[in-house]
Image: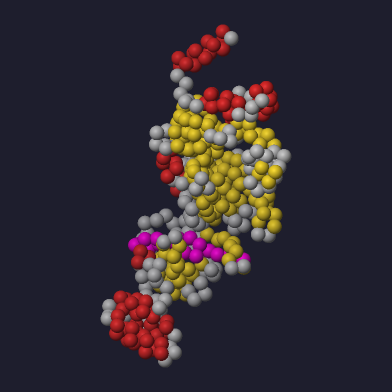
Amino acid sequence: MELDDHAEDLASDLGVDKEEVKSDLENLVSYSVPVDEAKQSLRRKYGDGSTSSTGAPSAVDVADVSPDDSSVTVTARVLTVGKRPIHYRGEDHVIFEGELADETGKISYTAWEDFDLEAGEVVEMGNAGVREWEGNPELNLGESTTLSRVDEDLDVAYTVGGDADLADLSPGDRGVNVEVQVVECERKTIDGRDGETEILSGTLADESARLPFTDWEPRPELEAGASLRLENVYVREFRGVPSVNLSEFSTAAPMDGGVDARDDPERLPIREAVERGGAYDVELVGNVISIRDGSGLIERCPDCGRVTQKGQCRSHGAVEGEDDLRTKAILDDGTGTVTVVLDDELTAQVYGGGLEAAKEHARDEMDQSVVAEEIAGRVVGHEYAVRGSLSVDEYGANLDATAFARSDDDPAERARDLLAEVEG
Ligand SMILES: [Zn+2]
């Protein structure tokens, strides 16, 4: 900050003339007084009522904490306390994080020291740092923060403790507890910071929603079908949707009686799903208006799985491609369009045959594109209900389908089809 900005800050805080404050500030700084100390002595000189003689930051309501404050004193009720390992500037730390609230609002915090915070208690935080995170102020509790328990009943309009339904979670939530059923669970090996690491990933469900999860510290309780209470989890964004994350400090306890899990996907208009920036396990219903290039019988790079063009992989050059089946269909419901991607199995269903049948078909016709043409002939112009997960990026909106079924069958048409089948 320039001296001019400091002067402006002070002047508006103290309600005095900026030029006057500035000349005092310049004067002090010219005597080698550090600028923060100079500002504090000027606050005393001009009598900032809320500032104590030790120059402690002023006490403010939560709603009044601004990203422009460097530090504040806040009294608030602790709503949630999450504990998480992080890697910051080359070092491993354990941080505590969550939300605090008073009568005026709530705010996120990160504690770099273990203040032994507990959900529900009321604390006064002196000299809490303020930083900006995605446009909002957050409190940073560190070495220079003083923390004391306050024997006061602070009425807050938020739930104390981190219990939540999956549908209510958003990226950035910390110290959350959920009661869920594990729908799918898969063990994976990834390239982590410390070399190869085993993780678990899959899908969780409760009555409100289904969401993906990652367990960074694979624990045996997480297996398909298990009903669990997960405590101290945090939420990150994964392909545009909230994803539940378990760290070494999260806990998973089996629940008696089981958890009811939603098993039908949410049905959304295409435009709304795309505007959400992504959606996990949704159902879209629309007409297939065309089939895109790269559908039908395709070849993939054996190293990275990318689809090759004329035997060339974008990363690996000339490769001996492996045959595969895929369909990229454009679905339109009148509100918007997405590209629906069908894997080999769903493509085999709509094509009416698997990889071997497709290769034979292409050999007979001496033309690989006959497979895509056959698929187009079967699906274009018909209405489909498609289930899967939508991702939206600069290349467009893609739905990785897990189910793809005709929804425009009218009874008369079905009867004609049946008749045709019976009569051969
Ligand atoms: Zn490749």
Task: Give the residue at the far top of this rendering.
Answer: 423
Residue at image x 45%, y 43%? Answer: 274
Q: Quadrant of the C terminus?
A: top right
Q: Is residue 337 visible?
A: yes
| Residue positioned 49% across, 12% down in the render | 416
Magenta-span inclusion, residue 378? no
Residue 83 in the image: state x and y as whole percent. 55, 61
- For residue 351, which quarter of the picture? top right
Q: Is residue 63 above or below residue 166?
A: below
Query: Which residue is located at x 37 percent, y 77 percent?
Result: 5
Residues in magenta? 92-110
Judging depth in this view, the residue of 261 and 213 nearest the camera is: 213
Considering only vertical position in the picture, is 13 above or below 98?
below
Closer-to-camera residue (310/240): 310
The quadrant of the rendering that contains the N terminus is: bottom left
In depth, the one of 83 and 171 nearer the eye is: 171
Magenta segment's dominant SS is: strand
422 vs 45, left or right, is right
